[in-house]
Each structure stands twice: as C-alpha cells, then as structure tokens.
Image (cartoon, rainbow, N blue to C red):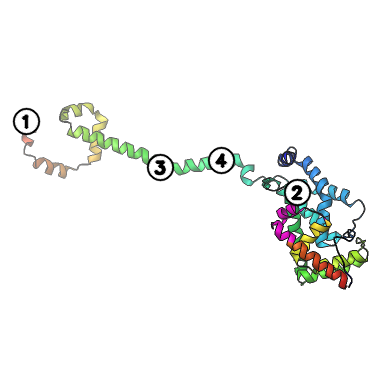
Amino acid sequence: MKSFNLENHPKIKPGFATPENYFEQFSEKLLASIPSEEKPVISIFAKNKKWLMAVAAVLILAIMIPFLNKTNSENQNLDTASLENYLAYQTTISPDELVSLLDYKDIEAIETDLNLDDATLESALSGNNYIENYITE
Amino acid sequence: MLEEQAFIQELLNPKTQNKAFQVLLSNYQKPIYNHIRNIVLNHDDSDDVLQNTFIKVFQNLKNFKGESKLFSWVYRIATNEAITFLNAKAKRNGMTSEDFQQKQIEKLTADSYFEGDEIQLKLQKAIALLPEKQQLVFKMRYFEEIKYEDLSEILGTSVGGLKASYHHAVKKIEEYMVSN
C-alpha cells in the first residue's frame, strides 16, 4: 500500500502568486487612504464650545431670575413684617414718637391706604368711649 | 519585548504614529497577506481583506493594551477579517462556507495568480475538506510555520488542543493524498 508522509515529504508551498510590485503599491494605497479614514472628528460641542457655553450661561441666568426675585421680595416682606411687629410690641416706643417720625407724605399715604369714608369714621368714633376726652384735649 | 513596548509607544503617540505604522506595514504586510490568502484563496479578495485588516489595525491602535504580542494581535484581526469575509461572500452567493470554499478551490486552476503544480493543488483540495478550525491550524503551522505558543495566543486555544488539531489534519491530508 502506498503511503504519504507529510513531514518526510519535501515542503509543499501553497502555490499562490501576487501581481508584480503588489506590496509596494499596496503600501502606497493604504497609507494614502489612512489620513482620510482618520480625519479628527470634531464634535458639534467642541466646535461651538464657546457659543454653547454662552447660551448655557444665559439660560441659567434666565431660569434663576424668578427665584432671585422671589427670594428678594420674601426678604423684603419678612423685614417689613418683623419691623411692624417690633414696633407694635415695643412698649418703649409711644405712638407720639412714631407719629413724630412720619412726615406729611407718610400720613397722606396712610390715609390713602385706609381709604376711610365719613360713615365708617363716624361709626368708629361713636364706638369710642374716650372720644370726648380726645376732643377736649 | 522592551523593543516591542517602545514600538507600541511610537504607534500610540500621535507624533510618531504615522511613521511607526509605515514600519509595521512593511514588516507585516507580506506575512499577513499570505495568511489571508491561505484562507480566502483568491488574490483580489485577499487584497480587500488585507486593506480592511490594516485599516482596522490603525483605527484600533489606541485600544491595543499590549496584553498580547503585537504580532498576535495583528494576526487575530486578519484571521477574523478573512473568516468574516469568506462567510459573508458565501452567504451572498447562497452557499454554505464549505461549498463556497470547494468552488474557490475548483477555480484555482484557472486563477492566473495560482502557480501551484499538481501536488500543490492536491494539497489545497485536501485542506479544503477539513473542518474550519483544523484548516486554520494546519495552514498556520505548516505553510506559515507559526509556533504553537503564538498560535495559541492568536486563536485562543490551548497548545495541547492545537497539537491535536494539527495531528488530525495531517492524518486526514495524508489519507487524501494517497487515495486521490
């Protein structure tokens, strides 16, 4: 029986050939194609970074305006209320002292705020037991 | 190994990358072409796969962690590219990979870039009948003379498993060579 021993047989080559100068041309072709393959990719964010940051800053400010306003007005209200309470419950300050601090414009403003008509004024005065004392004074 | 580390650094450094890649190309293009050609058999297809392989190598240099040898890494990419190409082409032609390969073997006699004699053609036919893994191991060991340790790194198989595959492949080839 015939036998074939691959290890003892002279080396058999694959038998493939390439076109002339194939490898030289391949190198050139590949190296020429690589820069176009690998153009640095600049993301939209990186490209417009300054603009996007400016827009973001404006947006943040715009969003914060209502909060800032609210905080300020709350502070003001709080201050006015505290001030009123302070003045109302501070027994060391007499009504006369308070009145002396008001000028004509302030009194006018209080009158406008109260917006009293004659009937209301009359009923308020008639309910006051000390009205006569005030009148004689 | 130190030289390889330095070379890898050159490949990763954008300033030296292009020059280092040219060196890699000139060192590897012939053996990688032969490796691909042994798998896909036809020159034009090998040219396409070779180009895809090196483009992939270039694009993935930044991901190369140096865990395996550069040689093994490039061979692994080439092997995957060649097998993927072969399977995709077989699918496009509505054939199994095995049938497609048989057809490629039949075309070898008319291929102007196949210069093999009768025994070389017979060996190619014998190889084409082997299972895919045995084909790969046989071609890489017998034609390309890659060491088992390197083969193990490229194919992700133990040296023992590779030796067994090669042994089976040789036995089947020898039987074919006698009986045909």
Q: Single out the mark in the foreground, 1 or 3.
A: 3
Report, in whole angstroms, how far the alpha carbon at label 3 lies from the one at label 2: 63 Å
Q: Work out how far the residue at label 2 is from the one at label 4, CA to CA, in angstroms.
A: 46 Å
Q: Is residue A121 left or right of residue B107?
A: left
Location of residue B118 with respect to A18 vertically, above or below:
below
Check if mark 1 and mark 3 are on a common chain.
Answer: yes
- Of marks 3 and 2, the one in the foreground: 2
The residue that appears at 49% across and 42% down in the rendered structure is A60
Read off the residue under disc 2. B71
Q: Nearer the viewer, mark 1 or mark 2?
A: 2
Give the secondary structure at mark 2: helix
Q: Residue B173 placed where, x, y %?
A: 83, 67
* Chain name for mark 3: A
Q: Quadrant of residue A55?
A: top right
Residue to which mark 4 is pinned: A53
Tell me the element at label 3: helix
The residue under label 2 is which amino acid type? Phe
Residue type, numbered disc 4? Met
Crowd rating for badge 2 (residues with CA inside 10 Å; few <14, some 14–19, many 20+): some
Which span of residues is magenta-colored?
Answer: B144-163
On the image, numbered disc 3 is attached to which residue?
Answer: A67
Position of residue B12 in the picture relative to residue A20 (left or right): left
Q: Nearer the viewer, mark 2 or mark 4?
A: 2
- B115 w.r.t. B98: above or below: above
Report the residue marked by disc 1: A136
Q: Of callouts 3 and 4, which one flags the residue occurring earlier in the amino acid sequence?
A: 4
Callout 4: SS: helix
User: Which circle, 4 or 1, is nearer the viewer?
Assistant: 4
The Cα–Cα distance between marks 1 and 3, rounded to whole angstroms, is: 55 Å
Separation (CA) of disc 1 from disc 2: 117 Å
